[in-house]
Image (cartoon, helix red, strand yellow):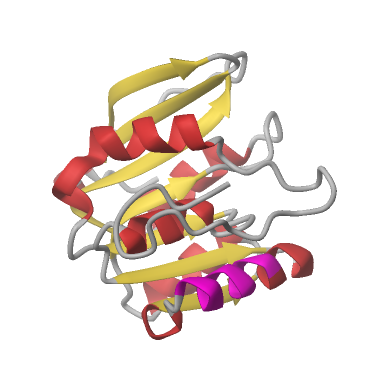
Amino acid sequence: MRIITGRARGLQLTTPKNFDVRPTADRVKESVFSIIGSKIIGTQVLDLFAGTGNLGLESWSRGAEGITFIDESRESLRLVQANITKCKADKDCTVIKGNAVNIIERLYKQGKTFDFAFCDPPYNKGWIARIIHALNTYPVLNHGGYLVVERAIHEVVEEMPAAFELVRSEKYGETIVDFIYFNRENIISD
């Protein structure tokens, strides 16, 4: 696993020694960032279920200004911090331990906002619906921002609130990546 391009191009990231973390494959990551393109430059990025920090650090390397990493696992956060240090990205990164849904609420109450949120949760655990609900209730995504979701091919994204529009889905073997546009003007409270 490596940083594909940008400031930290070619840097090998530290990876887990077990299978508790499932980092995004380089070919999937390369395709995702090819789709995002230059929209990532100058943005604030939220890396939910950070794992190794792979997606957030690729964003940083390509010009994102600030990255917030969230994970519940101490081991994952150790990997994230090691990779941030390896990239020399410490001043642009924040690492938070906790449940992604609860942290979204906390970030909202702190007035934090983001242009991209990457959501690569453990597959088939219902996390995607909970994250979308949290982002609708506590809109930390800026208007026109994107939620980028990685999921198993057989995992279905349920009907989303009006503020979220699925604009693109790409299939990579047994993985699907959804690009979901956020329109803050369409938020409807429960």
Query: Is residue 63 toward the left or the right of residue 123 in the image?
Result: left
Query: Does the rendering let one see residue 140?
Result: no
Q: Residue at x 33, y 48 (%)?
A: 189
Residue 110 left/right relative to 38: right
**Viewer-nearest residue: 129 or 170:** 170
Q: Which residues are magenta?
A: 79-87
Is 65 rendered above or below residue 18? below
Q: Is residue 125 visible?
A: yes
Image coordinates for residue 128, horizontal then vertical, percent: 54, 37
Is residue 23 left or right of 87 when viewed as pictured? right
Q: Looking at this rendering, what residue extends furthest in the front direction?
A: 10
Of all residues shown, which one is farthest toward the bottom?
Answer: 91
Q: Is residue 155 magenta?
A: no
**Residue 75, position as x, y percentages in the image:** 77, 66
Which quadrant of the structure image shows residue 37?
top left
Say if 27 sits above or below 47 in the image: above
Q: Which corner quadrant holds the C terminus?
A: top left
In the image, is 128 to the left or to the right of 76? left
Q: Nearer the viewer, residue 20 or 1?
A: 1
Residue 132 image point, x, y percent: 45, 42
**Residue 81 lies in the magenta stretch:** yes
Dominant secondary structure, magenta? helix
Q: Relative to the observer, which residue lies in front, 175 or 70? A: 175
* Numbered label tally: 0
| Above-or-below relation of 57 to 87 | above
Residue positioned 29% across, 22% down in the render:
168
The residue nearer to you, when weighing 97 against 161, is: 97
Q: Residue 39: x percent and y percent?
A: 17, 49
